[in-house]
Image: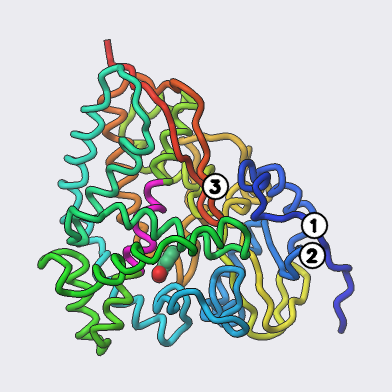
Amino acid sequence: MTATAPVAVSDLDPFSTDFLHNPYPAHAALRDAGAVVRLERYGIWATARHAEVRAALHDPEAFCSSAGVGMADFRKEAPWRPPSLLLEADPPEHTRARRVVAGVLSAAAMRRLADTFEAAADEMVAGLADGRTFDAMPELAVRYPMRVFSDAVGLPSEGRENLLHYARMVFNTFGPRNELFTTAIAENASTREWIMDHCRQEKLAPGGMGAEIHTRAAAEGFTPDEAAMLVRSFLSAGIDTTVHGLGNALLCLAQHPGQFALLRAEPDRARAAFEEVLRFEAPVQTFFRTTTRPVELGGTTIPAGEKVLLLLAAANRDPRQWESPDTFDISRRATGQVGFGFGIHACVGMAMARLEGEAVLTALARHAAGIEHDGPPRRMLNNTLRGLESLPLRLTTPS
Ligand code: OVV
């Protein structure tokens, strides 16, 4: 048997400025072009459909992570930083690393954090709900995770801004070597030093999650340097993702006042509302896999050693999967959204992300009567993350 259907091709660039500004029309074009599409510009494969994104994530043997989950193929070019033991690894190595990190981020650990996370959200939102204009990116979406996440990990107060610079760099480097990529890695020597230094046990407060990584990693037989690399995963993936999850939530609610009214009437909807935000405006838009053998996906046989772009955010709006996918509706069941990925590499910190989202949305429902724009939002462009640089808002107060 030979493949019969001709391969769908596209000249779209998913990392161009236009695409990153508004990816959704291009997502639709890619979904409609075929289940699997050849992106000629980069000589890679892509899928924008829910079933195929899920199928690829469900088969980590054929679609591996150890060759990198960005466009770069680690088998052909040296990675810009030592590969993550978690993200850029396959079983069995991945399984061991995952066990350590998952232990630290368990449901029990989240229950211990919940009161603190909720109190911080309540205090921060209450302080903003006085009718004045504020920039919700620096003053809430950035400030909240910078406080609760960094405190939970056990980082010192000084230098925390390095987390933001580092994450922005890491997520840009999953893309092609465009200007976002090269600018990101050009300037940041001192940021990288701060991050690597703060992965060491001596720098992490006793009782915090960073220290616990070291304890659990040692018990699993990892060296102190390997344990530090697992802390690096925390510091890479734990901040900007939630910053833009929260920022996108605020944007969605400001743009859909009826949906905020629903949330306000029933604050118990906060968790479902945050999940719908992740479906509708996924902070992490894409990840790549690399084929280890010829593998069939959506009727196309992809040869071995090929890069495959999984457009998570496009899968989240696939009309083959969702009813009215372009409608932001907090009453829908958004479970099955792939903003956290799926399968063995699904976001290991998703319980903490959801805790942060639920805490902030609950506090908004409690303290604000309405969320209004007070000036145009300004986009932050990144090869992987979708989010805002600035979001001028006003929270109206209950009369
Ligand atoms: C999910 C993610 C994003 C960025 C970095 C890492 C993980 C890591 O493991 O370093």
SS category of the residue bearing label 2:
loop
Q: Is residue 43 visible?
A: yes
Q: Earlier in the sequence, mark 3 or mark 2?
A: 2
Stretch of the chain drawn in magenta? 233-243
Are dots 1 and 2 in contact, CB under 8 Å? yes
Disc 3 marks a residue whose amino acid type is Leu
Residue at label 3? Answer: 381
Q: Which mark is residue 11?
A: 1
User: Mark 3, mark 2: which one is toward the viewer?
Assistant: 3
Left or right placement of residue 57 versus residue 97 in this view: right
The residue at the point 23 percent across, 57 percent down is 110
Counting from the top left corner in percent of width and height, residue 151 is at 18, 55
Quadrant of the drawing holding the C terminus: top left
Is 237 magenta? The answer is yes
Residue at label 2? Answer: 40
SS category of the residue bearing label 1:
loop
**What colour scheme does the image use?**
rainbow
Disc 1 marks a residue whose amino acid type is Asp
Q: Earlier in the sequence, mark 1 or mark 3?
A: 1
